[in-house]
Image: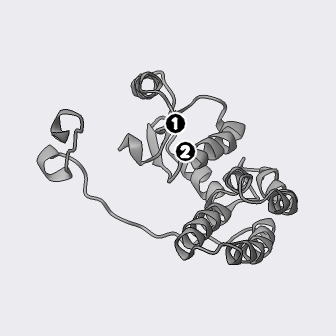
Amino acid sequence: GLADYVVRNRRGPVGGLPNRIPELFALEPSEVQNQLIDVGEGVMLDLAATLDDPRERNITLGRLLRALWGAPRALIDILKPLSPELVNHLVPYVHDVISAPLDHEGLPTGDARLRWLVKHLKAEAGNKVLIFVETDIAVRALKDSLSAIFGEHIAVFHKGLSPRDQDRQVAWFRDEDGPQIMLSTEAGG
């Protein structure tokens, strides 16, 4: 059976873990982020309307909108196979968001979610932080964004890595002198 290949632990039997306390943070998009969202949503709805299969349309639209709102740097990679014209149309808006300067505190000014994350990562200096994101494309995009601020010392874990490379990244993150940050898809759970 699967028990020989899959390890699944639940919080209860493991014990000793802190309680989960979900918190919602209302973030106001930056001006350039609002422009990207305004233009992107309209164009994506037009693109989705060209897809005949309702299931494919909903899946595609969901992926695009999540990237638009949450990982603008990943948006271009997701769009490339769907519509080169849309990529060309959105690249300037994405560029404005991801290349916006840092403020006097060293926080990004173009992407509200990235700004929030960087602020909290800086507050956790000295502590290891594991960040889960939805896709391997988003892992790579977030790593690119964070590397510009924290340097290349960031571990990653996703299904696109070989098992050997996954093990290496986990060992590197666990090392006392390893990176503070590890970015992972749910595959790292």
Q: Nearer the viewer, residue 62 or 49?
A: 49
For image coordinates 50% across by 31% down, the residue present is: 161
For image coordinates 33% across by 63% down, the residue present is: 21
The answer to whether the residue labelled 2 contacts the one labelled 1, judged by CB atoms less than 8 Å apart, is yes
Q: Residues within 10 Å of mark 2 (few under 14, many from 20)?
A: many
For image coordinates 76% across by 58% down, the residue present is: 109
Q: Nearer the viewer, residue 29 or 85?
A: 85
For image coordinates 59% across by 28% down, the residue present is: 153
Q: Residues within 10 Å of mark 1 (few under 14, many from 20)?
A: few
Whole-number angstrom distance, CA of label 2 to CA of label 1? 7 Å
Give the quadrant of the C terminus.
top left
- Tell me, for residue 9, which label it has, or none: none
SS for dot 1: loop
Does 150 appear above or below 71? Answer: above
Give the quadrant of the N terminus.
top left
Q: Which colour scheme appears in the figure?
A: one colour
Amino acid type, residue under disc 1 in the picture = Gly
Does 168 appear above or below 122? Answer: above
- Tell me, for residue 136, which label it has, or none: 2
SS for dot 2: helix
Horizontal relation, residue 101 to residue 53: left or right: right
Disc on the earlier residue, 2 or 1: 2
Amino acid type, residue under disc 2 in the picture = Asp
Q: Position of residue 137 (x, y in %)?
A: 60, 46
Q: Position of residue 125 (x, y in %)?
A: 52, 39
